[in-house]
Image (spheres, grey):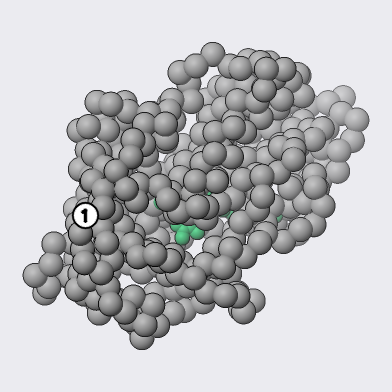
Amino acid sequence: MRGKERIAVVGAGLGGAAAAALLQRAGFTVDVFEQAPEFSRLGAGIHLGPNVMKVFRRIGIEDQLNAMSSHPDFWLSRDGETGEYLSRIPLGGFALREYGASYVTIHRGDMHQVQMTTLAPGSVHFGKYLTDVEEGGDDVLLTFGDGTTARADIVIGADGINSRIREKLLGPEDPHYSGWVAHRAVLTGDQLAKYGHDFEDCVKWWTDDRHMMAYFTTGKRDEYYYVTGVPHPAWEFKEAFVDSNRDEMFEAFQGYHPTVQALIESTGEVTKWPLRNRNPLPVWSQGRLVLLGDACHPMKPHMAQGAGMAIEDAAMLTRCLQETGLGDYPLAFDLYEANRKERASRVQAVSNANTFLRTQEDPAWVYGYDVYAHPLKSAAAA
Ligand code: FAD
């Protein structure tokens, strides 16, 4: 005899945690399988646009995130060398009024920790590296690296850019290396205090082929973060990321504005990450398996919307499953793809091109979007 219908989410990252929280709130029984033995406060910042905060409102953590994070009044783009302002995109009160929620910047570890508190007790299983999924007639068998197994009616692959579930659907294929790396460093307010510079709340310094984005990650403004995009012909390392250093940073940003030089001078630890990518996938689901987030549409991070798209996916997939019930998951998966693919692919293309907000433009198509606002497009209409 079969037990209760269950959904398995593989990966408790930013998208998987959102999907599990939303599905549990919608009344589904959800188990989350995460390969990491535990999560720590990984050193990086993240932007959350109003489009994402509207989903966090549904999960019940919007106020908490608002209280913890920095609220920039503008996204500023500046010429890396002269410091001239190329764009001033209004956020702050404008975003609240025009887009319906705040635009915030935060430490991703802090945000993820809040997300994890929203999951039903006992529903997250750590140390579960998915090695295989096998669809039977009635359900799916998941096998993990520790030799254990689990069964579920459907499986959501929220397992990031190297997704095993994507591999099951489309075969093995490494993501492409984009030819760019990102340096990431977190600085304390104390490290910056000695400079007479105005370290702006949210600023992207650009020259032709590279940039540095910098912003606060706390409401107290005691932590400042920068992330770069710098061309680098090949990723010659086996590791997911490697240490960089101040000398390499000074070389990469030679000729940049004194404020950028001050950031580099204050840098303690700085790491270097390959920016990887995939072309849009031909299918997002097959049988009882469905993908979301970086498993489905990874992108270069230059629009600061990768997690945003994963979280919007989570919200739309939940909507579609609520609409059809778990019994009609094939229709739910078709509806999900019909209602997500165009937007996620557009954001993926613009983010990869690294043009967003370099000059004065209207970002309403990104930030004004509300995943709950429109009736679902039928699967056939897509
Ligand atoms: P992930 O967050 O990668 O989560 C995947 C999870 O699956 C992980 O916990 C992993 O351990 C687990 N997992 C993997 N394989 C298995 C397995 N086989 N079995 C079990 N578990 C598994 N996005 C923004 O919205 N704003 C930003 O400002 C921003 N800045 C960025 C800066 C940089 C430099 C980079 C590289 C990315 C940035 N992003 C940003 C993008 C964002 O980090 C990703 O798009 C987002 O994390 C994707 O979420 P996800 O849940 O799909 O995948």
- Residue 265's quadrant in the figure? bottom left
Against 239, residue 171 (above or below) is above
The local secondary structure at tag 1 comes to strand
Question: Which residue does the numbered mark 1 point to in the structure image?
Answer: 85
Question: Residue placed at 21% from the left, 63% from the top?
Answer: 83
* Front residue of 12 and 350: 350
In percent of width and height, residue 166 lies at 73, 47
Quadrant location, the N terminus:
top right
Return the residue found at the far left.
196
Ligand 1 within 8 A of label 1's CB? no
In percent of width and height, residue 118 lies at 46, 37
Side (left or right) of 257 relative to 52:
left
Against 91, residue 233 (above or below) is below
Type of amino acid under label 1: Tyr
Against 104, residue 99 (above or below) is above
Return the residue found at the far right.
137
Q: Does residue 185 appear in this view? A: yes
- Residue 284's quadrant in the figure? top right
In percent of width and height, residue 216 lies at 26, 56
Q: Does residue 155 appear in this view? A: no
In percent of width and height, residue 19 lies at 56, 35
